[in-house]
Image (spheres, helix red, strand yellow):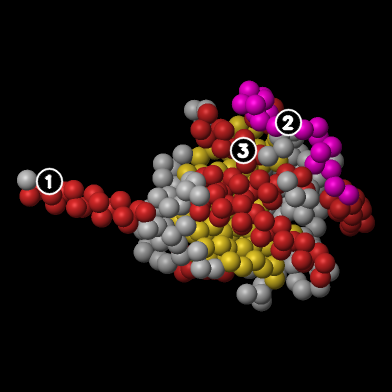
Amino acid sequence: MRILIIASAFFSWCAAQAADSPVAIVIHGGAGAMERGRYTPEEEVAFKAKLTEALDAGYATLDAGGTALDAVEASIVILEDSPFFNAGKGAVFTRDGANELDASIMDGATKNAGAVAGVKSVKNPIRLARAVMEKSRHVMFAREGAETFAREQGLEIVAPDYFYTDHRWNALQDALEAEKKDGKETALPVDTKYGTVGAVALDKDGNLAAGTSTGGMTMKSWGRVGDSPIIGAGTYADNKSCAVSSTGHGEFFIRLTIARDICAQVEYGGKSVGDATHDMIHNQLTAMGADGGVIVLGKDGDYAMAFNSKGMFRGVKTASEQRVAIYGNEE
């Protein structure tokens, strides 16, 4: 009888601990050449308002008892539907004038994941990535196969011109003209912003999730896929360590498996979220001559928003804190 009483008390304590888990959400809207003066005061207000809307949507989901996966999806859908960010509606154009979208999502409780690459007609790629995770036996679908799966799952399909925006089209024309003047292929404009969007969340049950969505790079080559749909590079989540979403020059994030490495440093190296994140972004990524950033959320609610570029659209919301920022020296 005493053993049963002790066991009962233990499980009650565990349940109480889970119920007391802090809920939190952290988001990003891309990093890059975003020094002060790039945007007008009116643009800054608009960007921050949309980031706040995405934060509020994710946090409201958590506050109502929703899962970390639900919160990540809710926040990213807001950002995908906005023309401000390089994902969904605001996606950049490929070299041949198309919009090709990538996304991924990961559940920290089960380490299940879903991803899509190169889709052209799915309104919200993050919803499709989650459907791949939950409704298929696979982790990643690409291009026509992904779009067929999206239709089978009843996801919203749009005409390709839904993703058109003047400023993204003009950016492609500027890049093509710069390449013509240089007389050689330009992989990426110098004055660039990586507009990938992402979210990481911690729910009341102590479960983590991460998601990332992007249109890739302006003038990217035929069929190019970056880190955003690559589990371990652009996205990773594990309840034993942390959840990560990346933004930056994807080729380098793939080579460094940045998202997974941060979680591994936390789990196996015993590092704090902040220390692990600093090592990957300010040491390893910088040493390779690349730039970008990450958002990271630990199993205890500790978080980091780190980047080695001029700025990163970012925000965090917890029970005691809410803030959004754009520039590197902005708190």
Q: Amino acid at mark 2?
A: Ile
Secondary structure under the numbered disc 2 in the rendered image? loop
Looking at the image, can residue 280 be seen?
no
Q: Residue 42 in the image: state x and y as whole percent.
A: 82, 67
Is 53 rendered above or below residue 81?
below
Label 2 or label 1, whichever comes before in sequence order? 1
The image quarter in which residue 88 lies: top right
Residue identifier under label 1: 4
The quarter of the rendered structure image containing the N terminus is top left
Residue occupying the point 59% across, 45% down? 73
Residue occupying the point 74% across, 53% down? 85
Q: Residue 231 in the image: state x and y as whole percent.
A: 53, 45
Q: Report the number of numbered marks.
A: 3
Which one is closest to the eye, mark 2 or mark 1? Answer: 1
Distance, label 2 to label 1, CA atoms, is: 55 Å
Label 1 or label 3, whichever comes before in sequence order? 1
Residue identifier under label 2: 157
Which residues lie in the magenta part? 147-166
Looking at the image, can residue 319 be seen?
yes
Residue 244 highlighted magenta (yes or no): no
Residue identifier under label 3: 127
Secondary structure under the numbered disc 1 in the rendered image? helix
Is 139 rendered above or below residue 48?
above
Residue occupying the point 13% across, 49% down? 5
Which one is closest to the eye, mark 1 or mark 3? Answer: 1
Residue occupying the point 66% across, 45% down? 77
Label 2 or label 3, whichever comes before in sequence order? 3
